[in-house]
Structure formats: structure tokens, C-alpha cells
Image: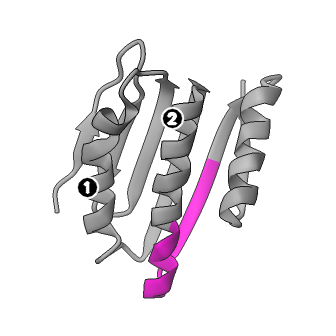
Amino acid sequence: MKELKILHTKNSPDIILRPDGVVKISGRSIQENVAEFFAPVEKWMSEYINEPADITCVDLKLEYFNSASAKVFIHLLEKLKHVSLKNKKCIFNWYYEEGDEDIYERGEYFASVLDVNFNFIKVR
């Protein structure tokens, strides 16, 4: 498996996916065709969960995302949850800016829907 790197634009996030268990998504996600944009991410994750690293660390540092992106994020995170079925560990870190209650609450919502624990990390 190879690393997948997608550089951000004004409407799409930075994405770094590494076979050693690093999953990083940061920035804004308001692109028009989320299915097309996230297709390579979905493909990579489908392959990854077959042979995941011992520890998968998911860092989400999102400034803003639309509802279409939210659906995709939940789907992708649900997929990553499955590494536990292979007796591996998955850590979810949700970064939010101090005072950004909207992003914090969306992280709480994701954790609740996915039924996983998120580490909420406040940044300044």
C-alpha cells in the first residue's frame, strides 16, 4: 500500500493517509461533488482496513464542512472503526479552535453516531 496525499484547495481539505496508521484530514470541505473528491480516499481506506497498522491514529482538524461532507466523513470513520475487528486500535482525535462551539459540537455528534470515543483537543 502506498501513501495517499491530497493537497487542500479553498474548498477541499488536506488529506494524508499512510499505511503506518496515520490518517489526517484538515481544513475546509465544501466541494460540490464530494463523492468524486473522496473516491480515492474511500478506495484507500477499503484496502487499508484489510491489513491495518497496529495503531491507527485519525486526526481531524476541520475548520468548516458542509452536510454532504459530514455524511462522507461519518461513512469513512465508520469504515476505520472496523480496524478493531482485526484486534487493532483506532484513536480518533478531533481538533477544534478555542471558542468554535460549532466544530466542537459536530465532533460530539460524530462520536455519538459512531459510538466511539473522541479525544477533543482545543487549539488556539
Q: CA–CA distance between discs 1 and 2? A: 16 Å
Q: Quadrant of the C terminus?
A: top right
Q: Amino acid at mark 1?
A: Lys
Q: Residue at x 48, y 21 (%)?
A: 30
Position of 116 compared to 57: left or right?
right
The residue that disc 2 covers is: 69
The residue that disc 1 covers is: 43
Q: What percent of the width, then of the height, locates residue 120?
A: 73, 47
- Vertical placement of residue 40 versus 6, above or below: below
Where, by quadrant of the figure, is residue 56 drawn?
bottom left
- Vertical placement of residue 106 versus 66, above or below: below
**Which secondary structure, mark 1?**
helix
Q: Residue furthest left?
A: 2
Q: What percent of the width, then of the height, locates residue 36?
A: 28, 35
Residue 18 seen in the current view: no
Callout 1: 10 Å neighbours few (<14), some, many (20+)? few
Q: What percent of the width, then of the height, locates residue 102?
A: 77, 28
* Total labels drawn: 2
Find the magenta span and give its range. 81-93
Residue 28 seen in the current view: yes
Q: Residue at x 65, y 38 (%)?
A: 95
Callout 2: 10 Å neighbours few (<14), some, many (20+)? many
